Image (cartoon, rainbow, N blue to C red):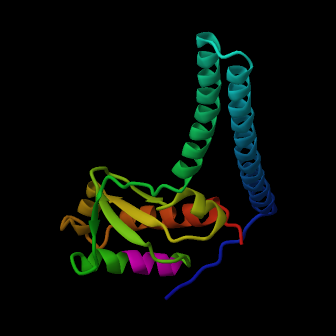
Amino acid sequence: MNSFKINVSETYKKAQKKSAVWIALFLITLFFSTILSIIIFIICVCGGIAIVIAKPMWITIFLGLGLLALGGLIVYYNIKFILNIFKKTATNGIEIFETDQPELFKLIKATADKVGTKHPKKVFIIDDVNAYVSYSNNLQSLVFPTRKNLSIGVGLCEGIYSKRHYFKINNLTRIVLVYNFVYVKYSIPTII
């Protein structure tokens, strides 16, 4: 099997380091914003209780409840954002397995081996004409190297299995699959 090496430029290496710094800054900012929202919540709770204790009237009770709601909403939306980061990405396609489509998986594995990347974690058929690669978990893919999911459009599969081509596999289809693997492998930096 022919293998080839892709040389990575200095510009790419600089961009990769810059991306790593931005991801680290994002995580630090996320940590401090969570701490700050908890501090604001504690201040709102203490302030609400202090207002009600200082002068127990209907207006102070509503002001105290308003402060409690304000602090609670700040914490709720901050934690909701954090939990959405860990949510798995949904795929709109139909998952296919190697037992169902052995020829397609043979092409995918040969393409991944030729490019020098890992085989996809899952393969989906989508109602589109293109192919793309996605991650199951967005935050995990930023920090750790993870295997990608491959989504292949029905139109692309039709091009692979069409009897109108002179070759067993359409060369254009092969080029598109190779491009997708190479693009994802070298455009999204991984932090080790």
Which residue occupies 73% across, 35% down? Answer: 40
Image-based side of 8 in relation to 121, left or right: right
59 is higher (above) or lower (below) than 159: above
Observer-nearest of 109 and 50: 50
Which residue occupies 57% across, 39% down? Answer: 76
Q: Is residue 165 magenta?
A: no
Observer-nearest of 77 and 6: 77
Image-based side of 41 in relation to 98, left or right: right
Residue 33: % across, % down: 73, 42
Q: Within the image, what quadrant is residue 15 found in?
A: bottom right
Which residue occupies 77% across, 52% down? Answer: 28
Q: Is residue 110 magenta?
A: yes
Observer-nearest of 118 and 35: 35
Total count of labels? 0
100 is higher (above) or lower (below) than 180: below
Image-based side of 82 in relation to 124, left or right: right
Q: What secondary structure do most residues of the magenta stretch adopt?
A: helix
Residue 67: % across, % down: 65, 25
Residue 75: % across, % down: 62, 39
26 is higher (above) or lower (below) than 43: below
Q: Within the image, what quadrant is residue 159 found in?
A: bottom left
Image-based side of 21 in relation to 156, left or right: right
Say which quadrant the C terminus sits in. Answer: bottom right
Q: Within the image, what quadrant is residue 89 found in?
A: bottom left
Please give the range of residues in magenta.
108-114
Residue 95: % across, % down: 29, 65
